[in-house]
Amino acid sequence: MSTPLRLATCFALLACFVASLFARTMPAKPTAAQTELWKQQGRELPVPEAQQPTLDSALPAYAPRRDIELSGHFKGASSDVLAALTKQWIVAFQKYYPKVTLDLPPPYAGSLGALELIKGDLQFVMVSRELKPTDVSGFAEKFGYPPFSAPVSGGTYRHFGFLDSIAFFVHPDNPLKQLTFEQIDAIYSSTHHRGGQAITTWGQLGLTGEWADKPIHAWGVKPWNGFEEFIRQRALSVGAKRGEWRTDINFTETVFPLSPAVAADPYALAYSGQAYIDDGLKLLALVPPGGGPAVAPSMTEVYAARYPLCRLVFFNTNKHPGQPLDPVLEEFLKFILSREGQQIILDQAIYVPLRAEQAAISRALLK
């Protein structure tokens, strides 16, 4: 073998080796046994991303209360993917207030915790998504007001099962580069709360030539599902007007079939958590609802909370509007939203800490 040929072969082998290091193994659907184990023990943490966010220096430091002595026994619940993080918050918080006990027993599942909150059997629940509409309506039916729900952490960039950011994606041959929220609403909804007419062809999105008259094959997850509810709330709903899905969407029971469907169809459009999108498919940038430049669903933009479909972790409890929250729960929430509380998120290296402006919005909900 000649020297140039040997060198070419070595470079090819090196390229394959490097590619294998960065290739992602796509997740498989959890088994019933795995799901049950996670309810009892919490989900095993994934391998952290090599690149991590930085803590926002504008986050306020936590100032413990000295004017009163906090004490009491409180019971909480959490999603299986939040059990470990919530326990870390509890341990750190109880060092400030040794007479406070916060219990977080299994089962770990956000849906179960929300139901128990309605029953009054616990005082707080950490949920890795927005509450189900039925949870909110069931709570309001019993108490006459909605549950108190405040974001306490960002989701993840693309960790399987751990509240990954959501992206819209197309076949790699599709020339489309970005979408607006008005376009998403026009493609996917029957209500069109963002105005305009239904969009059914790629030409209506600005594509020309052979693409102009080709139909958009829209794919999505069948309701109810945390992924579709998130898109419904963020893109199809406006204010108190709840968006409704078009009936001719190609619905799947889970997100797992969406990537193969788009890979096989140049005219397909779908959304999914980034952990479930196969390498090689084309992710679309999104124009924020308020306008401005399109933002790519990249790690940098998710970490900075600039990407419009970043997700959030919520602290939920029963707080009567206009009345103060129990002092212990109020301080626990303030601690989580502080620099020290968000540092615990950073140290775990799975979720994304809130930016200072996000934490300020959550603190303002206590008033």
Image: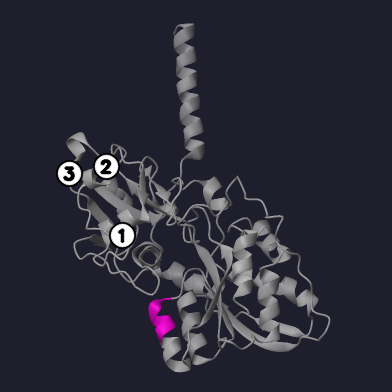
- Helix, strand or loop for disc 3: loop
Q: Quadrant of residue 264?
A: top left
Residue at mark 3 to residue at mark 2: CA–CA distance: 12 Å
Front disc: 3 or 2: 2
Magenta stretch encompasses residue 69? no
Q: Residues within 10 Å of mark 2 (few under 14, many from 20)?
A: few
Measured as percent of width and height from the top left, residue 199 is found at 22, 54
- Helix, strand or loop for disc 2: loop
Amino acid carrying mark 3 in the image: Lys
Q: Are marks 3 and 2 in contact (CB under 8 Å)?
A: no
Q: Earlier in the sequence, mark 3 or mark 2?
A: 2
List the residue tagged with mark 3.
Answer: 214
Amino acid carrying mark 1 in the image: Asp
List the residue tagged with mark 1.
Answer: 185
Comparing 101 with 341, the one in front is: 341
Amino acid carrying mark 2 in the image: Gly
Residue at image location 45% in from the left, 77% down from the top: 111
Residue at image location 23% in from the left, 64% down from the top: 246
Residue 348 located left or right of residue 133: right
User: Is most of the magenta stretch helix, strand or loop?
Assistant: helix
Determine which of the numbered discs, if any, sits on residue 206 in the image. Answer: 2
The range drawn in magenta is: 132-137
Q: Residues within 10 Å of mark 3 (few under 14, many from 20)?
A: some
Q: Quadrant of residue 193?
A: bottom left
Measured as percent of width and height from the top left, residue 86 is found at 63, 71
Up the image or down, 47 lies above or below 105; here it is above
